Image (cartoon, coloured by chain):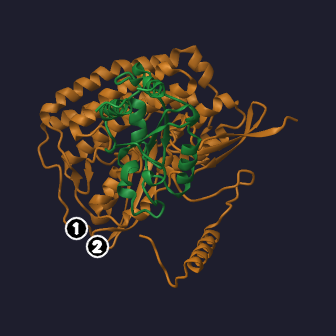
């Protein structure tokens, strides 16, 4: 039997944009186990949200993740609107759909580029990012910023899409179709990409259901799960689009699903722009107060379903804000997909779920061997109390002294 | 201009250290290397290890867990190394200043040579920062 070794990837690894720590347990070249350690990115956003008003919370959740910087605010404002029973004007709903789909477009292009980079196929990286630039320019035109668009607010959107801008947007999108079809053909035809991706990192349909995978990760395994269809909100009930699903659930299918989804996004945006050209009306209902109650907002982020929960006590701040990001469900699937593959394939398999650690940070420690939680919540509370007692003793103070 | 400064500013090898960031600054850094902006024309490349780096790019707030690593990465860098704090988070802590997991901005942990505010700064701003930095290193006014 070969000796078992551990290869550390991270926390600050040149391939990764974000700090996360993977421990690959390998026997020879074969991966036999995976440990995921997070926590480098935890900023305590849910707690911070309680210090901010509903309008400020939107800016805060925007900064959960720079790539999903519309999905989080969109889910958040929907939760606020659900709690406070706020009406949203119809024009605002179409604008929200356009911004959300533009974001999906740029996020999938970004992933495609990074996937090429992980494969050692830097040409794909450069090309994909080159054609991503026009989308960022569209964002700058519509919202005033390349990233962090600050478009959402409870009750509507902050800026209108001007009718005179619509031809520019349409032309940019029409020009994008060519390159996207080029990527589609390149991925589906290239024998090298087939050899690297097909049959690699397979997540079966049953596994996808067991892990509750969401978004393109689940759809590539044949689970037709999409908030836009399952729960038609915004303008999704009024536009025509398909859910793209794969069959095998390998990395190849995940790539194809994402590329085909960008074409569907363009289709949705074009239909929305057609309506926006003539639709009159305000884009903001200016809610003055949010009633007491609780609300849930969901949106299909580029990585999958994002859920925000907000409880209001009738004041101007959320009493509780809970975020469930899609990567939280998708990252654990790595623990089955990466097993049995070679170390060289591990990077692309780990990247195939389009992980987003800044969304995912939670406190939990799990032992890889047994799957048991190392610290239960009761133990954590005990640890915390012991530490506080120790600190108090050192500082010589009595009573609570919190740094807020 | 000394030989060392000349060699340092000819071709900057950059190591990028993303803290507890939202990723946007990191993505905009990568963006400057891709065809639209293409900083690699000027010999600016990302390197895999901080030991090879002339410039350390720091993005994001650093929480209690990652701050330990930040100090260690800085100690591992071959000196002289120029540290640039990119984005409002690295410069000041941005909106995370009241977080229970945040203590002080980056310049309290390691010496910072240049600050580049913005959320996130545009690639043009990053290129301008590089130009200013090279000028300053070469002693121009």
Please state which of residues A263 and B92 is positioned toward the viewer in this rendering: B92
Q: Secondary structure at mark 2?
A: loop
Q: Viewed as shown, does residue B52 lie left or right of A273?
A: right
Residue appearing at x 88%, y 35% in the figure? A1
* Label annotation for residue A289: 1
Q: Please report, as a chain letter, where disc 1 is located.
A: A
Badge 1: how crowded within 10 Å, few (<14), some, or many (20+)? few
Q: Viewed as shown, does residue A268 lie left or right of A116?
A: left
Q: Viewed as shown, does residue B92 lie left or right of A269?
A: right
Please state which of residues A86 and A51 is positioned toward the viewer in this rendering: A51
Q: Secondary structure at mark 1?
A: loop
Q: Which x, y percent locates residue A354? A: 50, 38
Whether residue A267 is visible to the viewer of this picture, yes or no, is no
Of all chains in the rendering, the one displayed in green is B
Badge 2: how crowded within 10 Å, few (<14), some, or many (20+)? some
* The C terminus of chain A: image quadrant: bottom left
> On screen, A364 above or below B19?
below
Q: Which x, y percent locates residue A49? A: 37, 62
How much space separates mark 1 and mark 2, taking CA atoms?
A: 8 Å
Q: Which x, y percent locates residue A63? A: 38, 50
Residue appearing at x 44%, y 57% in the figure? A323
**Labels 1 and 2 touching (C-beta < 8 A):** yes
Whether residue A138 is visible to the viewer of this picture, yes or no, is yes
Q: In which image quadrant can residue A240 be found?
A: top left
Please state which of residues A62 and B17 is positioned toward the viewer in this rendering: B17
- Residue under label 2, please give it: A314
Chain A: drawing colour: orange
Q: Viewed as shown, does residue B118 lie left or right of A337?
A: left
Q: In which image quadrant can residue A163 be found?
A: top left
Same chain for mark 1 and mark 2? The answer is yes
Residue appearing at x 52%, y 41% in the figure? A355
């Amino acid at each position: 039997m070969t000796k078992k070794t551990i290869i550390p990837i991270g926390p600050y690894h040149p391939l990764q944009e974000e700090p996360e720590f993977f421990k690959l347990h390998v026997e020879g070249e074969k991966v036999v186990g995976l440990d995921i350690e997070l926590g480098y990115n935890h900023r305590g956003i849910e707690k911070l949200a309680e210090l901010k008003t509903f309008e400020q919370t939107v800016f805060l959740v925007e900064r959960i993740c720079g790539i999903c910087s519309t999905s989080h605010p969109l889910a958040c404002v929907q939760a606020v609107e659900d709690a406070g029973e706020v009406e949203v004007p119809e024009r605002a709903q179409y604008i929200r759909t356009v911004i959300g789909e533009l974001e999906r477009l740029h996020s999938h292009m970004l992933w495609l580029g990074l996937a090429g980079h992980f494969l050692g196929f830097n040409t794909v990286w450069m090309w994909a990012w080159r054609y991503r630039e026009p989308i960022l320019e569209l964002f700058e035109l519509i919202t005033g910023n390349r990233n962090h668009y600050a478009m959402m607010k409870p009750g509507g959107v902050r800026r209108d899409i001007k009718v005179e801008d619509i031809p520019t947007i349409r032309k940019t999108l029409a020009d994008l179709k060519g390159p996207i079809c080029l990527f589609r053909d390149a991925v589906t035809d290239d024998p090298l990409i087939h050899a690297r991706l097909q049959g690699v990192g397979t997540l079966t349909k049953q596994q996808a259901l067991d892990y509750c995978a969401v978004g393109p990760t689940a759809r590539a395994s044949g689970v037709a799960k999409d908030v836009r269809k399952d729960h038609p909100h915004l303008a999704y009930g009024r536009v025509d689009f398909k859910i793209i699903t794969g069959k095998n659930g390998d990395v190849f299918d995940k790539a194809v699903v994402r590329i085909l989804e960008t074409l569907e996004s363009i289709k949705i945006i074009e239909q929305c722009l057609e309506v926006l050209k003539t639709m009159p009306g305000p884009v903001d209902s200016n809610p003055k107060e949010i009633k007491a109650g609780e609300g849930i907002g969901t949106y299909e982020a580029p990585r999958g379903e994002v859920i925000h929960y907000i409880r209001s006590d009738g004041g101007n701040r959320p009493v509780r804000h809970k975020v469930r990001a899609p990567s939280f469900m998708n990252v654990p699937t790595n623990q089955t997909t990466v097993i049995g593959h070679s170390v060289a394939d591990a990077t692309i398999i780990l990247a195939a779920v389009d992980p987003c650690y800044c969304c995912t940070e939670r406190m939990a420690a799990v032992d890889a061997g047994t799957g048991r939680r190392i610290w239960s919540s009761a133990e954590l509370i005990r640890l915390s109390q012991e530490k506080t007692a120790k600190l108090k003793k050192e500082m010589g103070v009595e009573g609570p002294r919190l740094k807020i | 201009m000394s030989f060392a400064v000349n060699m340092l500013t000819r071709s900057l090898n950059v190591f990028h250290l993303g803290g507890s960031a939202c990723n946007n600054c990191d993505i905009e850094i990568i963006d400057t290397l891709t065809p639209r902006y293409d900083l690699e024309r000027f010999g600016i490349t990302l390197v895999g290890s901080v030991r090879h780096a002339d410039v350390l790019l720091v993005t994001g707030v650093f929480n209690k867990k990652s701050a330990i690593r930040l100090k260690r990465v800085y100690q591992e860098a071959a000196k002289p190394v120029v540290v640039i704090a990119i984005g409002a988070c690295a410069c000041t802590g941005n909106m995370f200043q009241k977080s229970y997991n945040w203590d002080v901005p980056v310049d309290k942990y390691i010496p910072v040579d240049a600050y580049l505010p913005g959320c996130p700064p545009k690639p043009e701003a990053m290129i301008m920062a590089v130009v200013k930095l090279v000028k300053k290193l070469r002693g121009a006014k």
